[in-house]
Image (cartoon, helix red, strand yellow):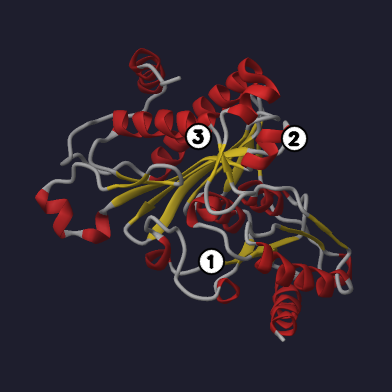
Amino acid sequence: MSINSRGTEQLASRADNRGFSASNSPGSVRPSVRELRDRAVLIARAAAAHIASRRVELGSDGVLASSETKSSAVDPVTVVDRESEELIRSLIKTFSSSDRILGEEGGLDDGASSPAQAANEGEAVTWIVDPIDGTVNFLYDLPNCAVSIACAVGDEVVAGAVANVSSGEIYSAAKGEGAQVSRRDGTVQTLSCSPTAELEKTLVATGFSYSASLRQVQGRIASQLLGECRDIRRMGSAALDLCMVAHGRVDAYYEHDIKIWDYAAGALIAAEAGARIRVPEFTQCANVTGRPEGDPLDFGVGAANSEVADAFFEALDGAVAQARN
């Protein structure tokens, strides 16, 4: 199934009616960070609705039949992942044909930049897209998968949205503007991290690699941390895990061997809610591989509320060092 242009045009038309300034001109004035956030929210909502609808249409057997594997036998991609990214890319292009798009399934599209924009890389706008974060959960019909859309200007992520497909919650943030979650009933809540200050009372979220050998090392890291924190949760979506830190539903999060499209939006949302975050350098990750070269244990992603961050990151670093031995 391909996303038809008529549906895309209708969604974009509704965006214009809500005050967005869609433009296909490469020389247009760049929108504010709030406008970029609102675009991310609109597009994430549309993609999440498509994913939910297609899950019902295909059923579990249909989703499984449409899946393939990528980096390993346990790293799946489905037809709905690709449909979702196609929809997201088309909606981004409706707003601006000059913006770059880096997507998990479709790679990097450099956009239709003007010569002046090409000469000024610091002003380049890049959208970073994970069409379904938590594809294994989607395969099994577990209620924890999301659409993640971040927007960077130059080397800095300035806006992002993460839409929980099952709950309808949409987490979003703009640089310097705080973070929020909106719900299907129209309510909007400002986000702030938990106040937990003691490591032994810290609830930690994490995830594991598709590489079996790296998972064994990650198991040793988790085992070490389990002796120092309240407990560990493994929910299957890095984007939502970071939003859980922002929402105060967990106190901290860490993961190794994930890609920029997994965490770009969620990390900004967590930071704007008051979390301390660790992410690799943007320039090392904004490419088709989505991650720096080298040992995955050298460039993990982490977030924790400000009260427990020092103790958590010290414990995490110690666990990683011990697991290497």
Mark drawn on residue 279: 1
Is label 3 in a helix, a strand or a loop?
helix
The type of residue carrying mark 3 is Val
Q: Residue furthest left?
A: 115
The residue labelled by disc 3 is: 41
In the image, residue 228 sits, relative to residue 137, either above or below, namely: below
Q: Residue at x 69, y 82 (%)?
A: 324
- First in sequence: mark 2 vs mark 3: 3
* x and y, in percent, of residue 167 in the image: 70, 30
Residue 190 occupies quadrant: top right
Tell me the quarter of the image containing the N terminus. top left
Left or right of 235? Residue 223 is: right
In the image, residue 288 sits, relative to residue 276, either above or below, namely: above
**CA distance for labels 1 and 3:** 23 Å
Dot in front, 1 or 3: 1
**CA distance for labels 2 and 1:** 27 Å
Q: Residue at x 38, y 14 (%)?
A: 10
The residue labelled by disc 2 is: 142
The type of residue carrying mark 2 is Leu
Left or right of 322? Residue 209 is: left
- First in sequence: mark 2 vs mark 1: 2
In the image, residue 225 sits, relative to residue 84, either above or below, namely: below
Q: Nearer the viewer, residue 194 or 151?
A: 151
